[in-house]
Image (cartoon, grey):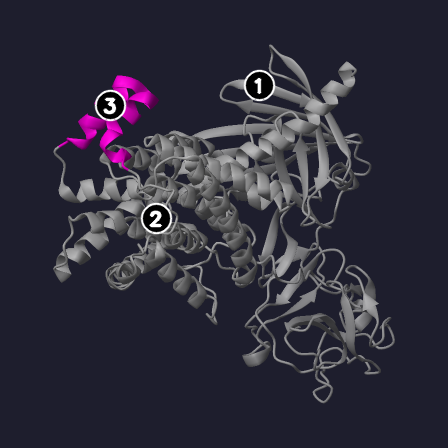
């Protein structure tokens, strides 16, 4: 075999091994709804505090991973550990109840496969409702095998508990035994001891050391998850005290993990962490406590532990109930794309709520070329009242503020008269009214109120209407398909129009005379004495000078990233130099992203007629791709001198970790920090035929109005695309150039 063939085999085998390792580790961390590799490693280590329990847990996970890969199940689901953590729990459960033997190893392998099949089946059954199967497969499988093994006479019950110190010595020697005895013998509050023991019970152990290590890992992985675990447990602890139930016995401590898992799941994992999610978590924990008591009484008749059944029932019932809400609430929002970290879910949600809250709307734009003035906006001075209040009238004025030449006695005197009007967005012509004569200036046709009109259907709930058009200039007919920017008619003076203008409104129905709806325009420019501002999903106001974005070919070309395109750059930091390669790719959801093969980082983006903007970043934040992500986070494709674009980064990406770590604890309740993106259109070398554009941008972190740190970028764009990016980060100057 040649060296090349060997290298190719290694190259092919490495992703498989990486995937396999990820499946195994995340099967551990998913017990706490996490995909944090270090937390997973910590949990794996802790399971071996009882060596044979840890061993059979690992055998169970390895069995599931091999079966899943061999059977060809979705690797992305397998890698998240979603189909593996239940098998792990079953392996741990059998390992702790029975003495180690080859018989037990065989049973664990069978149980792991059985649990895996239940997980896959439940994913298909309740997953279609957007519900998780939680640890239901673990409960069903372990019940089945616990009942069956009562007849397996070759298997003996576990008696290893009396040799705990010996087992710990094998793992960590005398230091681990010393730590075990020190922590277990600490004089701590009974409630705190119960909390740690409840955490350890999740891994079928019963000692303070395991709980302490898990609590520490939970704190490092997620401050929100840790605080929820504490709050939820002590809410239950207080509830037990109020109702007079015994709160320090073995049963309570063993079942205490139901409150811990329920509080994390409801307060910050399946729901976006917020004041409301915390409140509902507090209200639902007593239900978990009541079910824990009642179900334990029932199932003990069959000698079956209830394990995590109360947690599963309450969480699934509540999440299922939320599916029937008639009105969406930002205060209690479900997590629709799971990032497996409460903080990340929260910060992305808050960022997306501002950036993409209008993403589902049809991107309606202005219905004309050039710059026009809003002569009457919503809730107009003369018309636009009642059900017709959400409409605009547009005219054209000259530099002197006049809308006509000569004496303005004729329609032709008006600057907007006979100017072309365009489709404000793609759609189908729903209705056309033509043949109505223009009015004499100063008079109005009150019989044919709307005058010549075009109504365009954009979807079943959104229609746009242009009225007061000039007779005989309409270029479309009912049923025609139109594209944004296509000329469809000319401005006129027909209908209730004493002087030429265009009336524009958005309505929910296809009828002429339909009520208007309060609907924002997607992107447009506001002109103010040579200054410009980009407006996104807002509504033009009275007397504003507005226009659609006039794109610059140089920017359009530079930001036109096509799947399969390779971007090559040299990076220097004054000392070292390296070459990097970014490839434009598309995933299975048709999302475009740039991929850095060296760091495996991905920067997702969207590109439309007017804007280029990044939507999400994942991977190594030390990658040079992260600098591009920050430098060109949002770019409007038309060059307007000194135009400034402001946007926000999600805090988890850019905020200083040492501050964010503390901020995580209070982030569900208050928000006083931001990570701001700013881009300035600095220079254009030629207004007629530009060959070079300079953009200046920055990422600045604030607490209230106090600036913490700032990264600055200068981007040079020319005919070759992105020619150069100067990066100024922490007193370091990094150059990225072709």
Which label sits in the foreground, 3 or 1?
A: 3
Q: Which residue is mark 3?
A: 177
Residue 13 found in image quarter: top right
Q: Could you give the CA–CA distance between mark 1 and mark 2, rounded to whole angstroms?
A: 36 Å
Asked if residue 181 is among those painted magenta in the image, a careful observer would answer yes
Q: Which residue is mark 2?
A: 670
Disc on res. 733: 1
Residue 377 found in image quarter: bottom right
Residue 512 falls left or right of residue 344: right
Which label sits in the foreground, 1 or 2?
A: 2
Q: Which stretch did the figure color magenta?
A: 159-186
> In the image, residue 555 lies at what x, y percent?
74, 39
> In the image, residue 18 lies at what x, y percent?
59, 31
For label 1, the crowd category at 10 Å Cα-Cα, with few meaning under 14, some 14 to 19 and many 20 or more, is some
Mark before the other along the chain sequence, 3 or 1: 3
Instruction: Please tell me which residue lies in front, 544 or 291.
Output: 291
Mark before the other along the chain sequence, 1 or 2: 2
| Identity of the residue furthest to the bottom in this view | 447
Asked if residue 341 is among those painted magenta in the image, a careful observer would answer no
> In the image, residue 291 lies at what x, y percent?
28, 62
Q: Are marks 3 and 1 in contact (CB under 8 Å)?
A: no
Residue visible at 68% across and 23% down in the picture: 10
**Is residue 16 depicted above or below 415 in this figure?**
above
Instruction: Please tell me which residue lies in front, 509 or 475.
Output: 509
Instruction: Please tell me which residue lies in front, 124 or 590.
Output: 124
Q: Could you give the CA–CA distance between mark 3 and mark 1, rounded to whole angstroms?
A: 51 Å
Disc 1, SS: strand
């Amino acid at each position: 075999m040649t060296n090349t063939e060997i290298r190719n085999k290694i190259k092919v085998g490495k992703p498989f091994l990486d995937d396999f390792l990820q499946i195994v580790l995340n099967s551990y961390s998913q017990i706490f709804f996490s995909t944090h590799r270090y937390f997973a490693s910590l949990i794996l280590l802790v399971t071996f505090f009882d060596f044979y329990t840890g061993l059979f847990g690992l055998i169970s996970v390895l069995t599931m991973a091999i079966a899943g890969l061999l059977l060809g199940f979705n690797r992305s689901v397998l890698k998240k550990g979603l189909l593996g953590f239940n098998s792990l729990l079953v392996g741990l459960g059998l390992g702790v109840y029975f003495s180690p033997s080859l018989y037990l190893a065989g049973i664990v392998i069978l149980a792991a496969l059985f649990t895996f099949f239940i997980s896959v089946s439940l994913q298909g059954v309740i997953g279609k409702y957007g519900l998780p199967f939680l640890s239901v497969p673990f409960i069903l499988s372990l019940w089945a095998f616990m009942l069956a093994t009562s007849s397996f006479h070759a298997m003996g019950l576990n008696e290893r508990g009396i040799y705990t110190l010996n087992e710990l010595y094998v793992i960590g020697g005398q230091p681990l035994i010393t730590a075990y005895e020190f922590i277990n013998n600490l004089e701590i509050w009974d409630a705190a001891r119960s909390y740690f023991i409840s955490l350890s019970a999740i891994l079928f152990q019963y000692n303070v050391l395991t709980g302490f290590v898990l609590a520490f890992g939970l704190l490092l992985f997620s401050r929100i998850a840790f605080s929820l675990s504490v709050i939820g447990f002590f809410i239950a602890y207080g509830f037990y005290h109020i109702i007079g139930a015994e709160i320090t016995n073995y049963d309570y401590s063993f079942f205490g993990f139901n409150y811990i898992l329920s509080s994390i799941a409801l307060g910050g994992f399946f729901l976006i962490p917020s004041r409301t999610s915390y409140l509902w978590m507090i209200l639902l924990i007593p239900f978990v406590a009541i079910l824990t008591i009642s179900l334990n009484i029932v199932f003990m008749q069959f000698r079956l532990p209830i394990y995590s059944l109360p947690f599963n029932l309450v969480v699934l019932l509540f999440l299922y109930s939320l599916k029937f809400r008639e009105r969406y609430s930002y205060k209690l929002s479900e997590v629709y794309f799971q990032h497996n970290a409460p903080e990340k879910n929260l910060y992305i949600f808050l960022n997306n709520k501002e950036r993409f809250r209008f993403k589902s709307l049809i991107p309606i734009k202005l219905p004309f070329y050039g710059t026009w003035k809003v002569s009457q906006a919503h809730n107009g001075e003369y018309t636009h009242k009642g059900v017709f209040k959400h409409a605009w009238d547009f005219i054209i004025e000259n530099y002197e503020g006049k809308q006509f030449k000569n004496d303005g006695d004729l329609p032709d005197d008006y600057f907007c008269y006979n100017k072309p009007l365009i489709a404000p967005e793609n759609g189908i012509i729903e209705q056309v009214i033509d043949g109505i004569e223009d009015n004499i200036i100063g008079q109005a046709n009150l019989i044919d109120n709307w005058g010549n009109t075009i109504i365009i259907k954009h979807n079943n709930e959104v229609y746009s209407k242009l009225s007061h058009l000039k007779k005989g200039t309409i270029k479309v007919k009912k049923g025609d398909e139109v594209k944004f920017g296509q000329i469809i008619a000319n401005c006129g003076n027909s209908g209730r129009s004493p002087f030429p203008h265009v009336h524009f409104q958005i309505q929910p129905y296809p009828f002429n005379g339909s009520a208007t709806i309060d609907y924002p325009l997607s992107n447009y420019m506001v002109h103010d004495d040579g200054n410009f501002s980009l407006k996104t999903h807002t509504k033009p106001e009275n007397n504003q000078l507005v226009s659609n974005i006039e794109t610059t070919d140089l920017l359009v070309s530079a930001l036109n990233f096509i799947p399969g395109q390779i971007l090559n750059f040299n990076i220097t930091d004054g000392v070292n130099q390296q070459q990097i390669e970014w490839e434009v790719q598309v995933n299975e959801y048709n999302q475009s992203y740039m991929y850095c093969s060296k760091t495996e980082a991905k920067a997702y983006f969207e590109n439309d007629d007017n804007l280029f903007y990044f939507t999400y970043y994942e991977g190594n934040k030390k990658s040079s791709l992260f600098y591009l992500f920050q430098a060109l986070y949002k770019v409007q494709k038309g060059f307007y001198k000194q135009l400034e674009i402001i946007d926000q980064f999600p805090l988890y990406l850019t905020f200083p970790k040492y501050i964010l770590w503390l901020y995580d604890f209070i982030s569900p309740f208050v928000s006083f920090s931001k990570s701001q993106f700013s881009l300035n259109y600095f220079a254009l070398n030629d207004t007629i035929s530009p060959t070079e554009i300079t953009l200046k941008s920055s990422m600045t972190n604030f607490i209230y109005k106090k600036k913490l740190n700032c990264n600055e970028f200068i981007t040079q764009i020319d005919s070759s695309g992105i020619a150069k990016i100067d990066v100024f980060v922490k007193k370091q100057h990094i150059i990225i150039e072709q």
